[in-house]
Amino acid sequence: MLNDRDVLILAALNNSEKLHSESFEYKSLFLNLILPDNTNARFLPSVFIENEHARLFRERKLTKNQLIELYDANDKVIIGKNCFINCLKYGSNCWKKANKSIESIIELGENIAVSEVIQVPTVYPLGNKQYQILTGHRRFFALIFTYGIDHASQFKVYDTKPILYKVKQFQENASREDLPQYGKLQAFLSAMMEIEGLDQARLKIGDKKLTVREKAKNLGISMGAFDNYNVLTRYPEVIKAYQDGLTASFLKVKKIILECETRYKNTHDKKVLGIKDKKAIAENILEQLLGKKKNIKKVNAFTFPKITNLNVLKKLLFTDVSALNSHIDWVNLDWEDNDKVSALVKKLIISIEDS
């Protein structure tokens, strides 16, 4: 069953259309007509407030809670003219990441205030005179922070939504040093889903799948970078580690992944890895990355007193000591509790010595 995107890709290939040559023009649009893309790595869960409300908040005539109630902004970031309010759960990873994004957007906004945006954000029409951001989320947020929601600004406007729009987003995200590693990995996975759709469409018209070199070219990255992304996205656990705050470089993590895979294959004499194998490798990778070891339950050893009396030793070895009158309840003893067992054996030995 083909989805809408696959149908568009197939139609474009049948009509010999170029997938990266969509028509566009530059337009001046009001910021309140633009919607962010919540599937983009640059997305910030946000709500935009009117200039007057932003002013009242800055002058402490409106509280954070009042704005949250007014704009239903719980678990979102409030953005207005010279106003950023992080309403995500305090101290959470999302809250921390949002704070970092806010800092970089404010810095970008301060630059925009004294100079124009060199590379304008790109958008495409949604209908009802609204547009959705394709690339340039941070620049868009910075424009709202600098000028307010009622301001008009220049945008690169595509006639329609680009067929491979996730590929276009990745092309920009991969080239930006300031995007967190997790965002880049997510953008790569989304772009590769579109590339896979393109491959399937090519097969349907009798063409071959894209080569690795062609895939890298479509994504706008080198063969080496393409290999890096492929290795780094091989294990969901690695992506999750980046989402939770891992900051190690891609090259360092790639090296660890390849070393863990090679070691596992050599140890278990395997060339092809199954699901269980990959799970075991992922655990080892996380141990290397995060310094975490498997939680092994520590079991206390049995401890018995030294036996110096030969008769006591013989009685322990050759007699049913549970039948002795030692006043020990062997039936109800918790044999899983090593400390209790050790204590009662000690009591038994003392009882035999005294008898």
Image (spheres, helix red, strand yellow):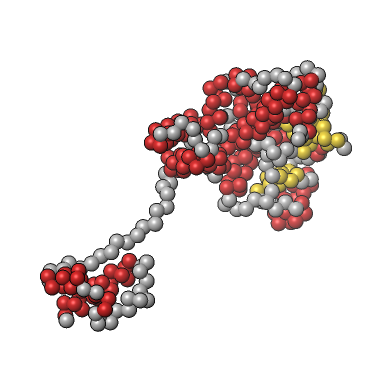
Asked if residue 47 lies left or right of residue 333, the reply is right
Quadrant of res 217: top right
Q: Is residue 191 visible?
A: no
Q: Position of residue 238 (x, y in %)?
A: 52, 39
Q: Is residue 72 visible?
A: yes
Residue in front for this viewpoint, 151 or 13: 13
Number of marks = 0
Identified at 28% across, 82% down, the residue is 327
Q: Position of residue 180 (x, y in %)?
A: 58, 36
Residue in front for this viewpoint, 67 or 244: 244
Asked if residue 298 lies left or right of residue 348, the reply is right
Q: State the residue lying farthest toward the top.
A: 16
> In which quadrant will I find the N terminus?
top right
Identified at 62% across, 40% down, the residue is 101
Q: Position of residue 205 (x, y in %)?
A: 75, 21
Quick check: 338 above or below 49? Answer: below
Residue in front for this viewpoint, 261 or 247: 261
Identified at 71% across, 40% down, the residue is 38
Residue in front for this viewpoint, 310 or 81: 310
Identified at 35% across, 76% down, the residue is 331
Q: Position of residue 229 (x, y in %)?
A: 56, 29
> In which quadrant will I find the C terminus?
bottom left
